[in-house]
Image (cartoon, rainbow, N blue to C red):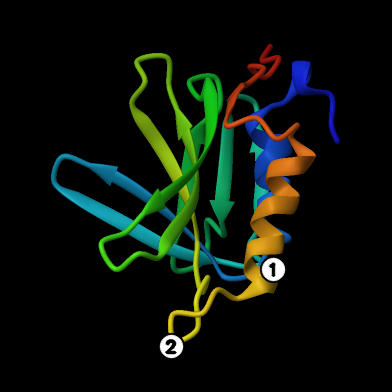
Amino acid sequence: MVNIGSISFEDIFKDVLFLENIMISIRNDGGVAELRIDRNTPFRVNGQYATIGDEKGSWHVHINTTQVREAKFVIEEKENGNKSYSLRFFNSNNSLVLRVNFMKMYTSDNVPIQESLIQYNRLFAKYGGKELLTLTPPQVS
């Protein structure tokens, strides 16, 4: 378990990169971008901005880490009875900045995939088993 009092966006996202079957989504009023990430997805922080993806590649995302204030582990029940699992990052206005979606949680027969559940639960436990985390802003000079 990490020190719950000093968790940053960078800390959590570095852990997310080591997970399998992950998709990040970013939504605004007119659309949604969904991007599959894996262990080879470049991630770096320079000043207040985190860059996910390769700036010279086919896609990349910049996140202003000074604006990301909370992380929330979310489990939602879907209409078919299955559950969806995500980690959501919010700004100080409680607006969603970025969503990490845990994919492939069920087989085609709607049986939970234990390895996928374990992956989510390990990340949740690492951060104290708390649904809502207040994030420490980066030190930007």
Q: Position of residue 79 (x, y in %)?
A: 25, 62
The three-letter code of the residue at mark 2 reads Ser
Residue, disc 1: 40
Q: In the image, is residue 124 above or below residue 93? A: below
In primary-sequence order, the first of circles 1 and 2 is: 1
> Is residue 31 toward the left or the right of residue 25 in the image?
left
- Residue depth check, mark 1 versus mark 2: number of the one nearer the observer: 2
Q: In the image, is residue 27 above or below residue 64? A: below
Camera-nearest residue between 129 and 17: 129
Camera-nearest residue between 59 and 120: 120
Quarter of the image with the N terminus in it: top right
Q: Which circle marks residue 108 in the picture?
A: 2
Crowd around label 2: few <14 · some 14–19 · many ≥20 (10 Å): few
Which residue appears farthest toward the front when viewing the image? Answer: 81
The three-letter code of the residue at mark 1 reads Asn
Q: Quadrant for residue 22, please give it.
A: bottom right
Q: Which residue is drawn at the image coordinates 58% and 32% (left, top)?
A: 131
Secondary structure category for the residue under label 2:
loop
Q: Position of residue 67 (x, y in %)?
A: 48, 20
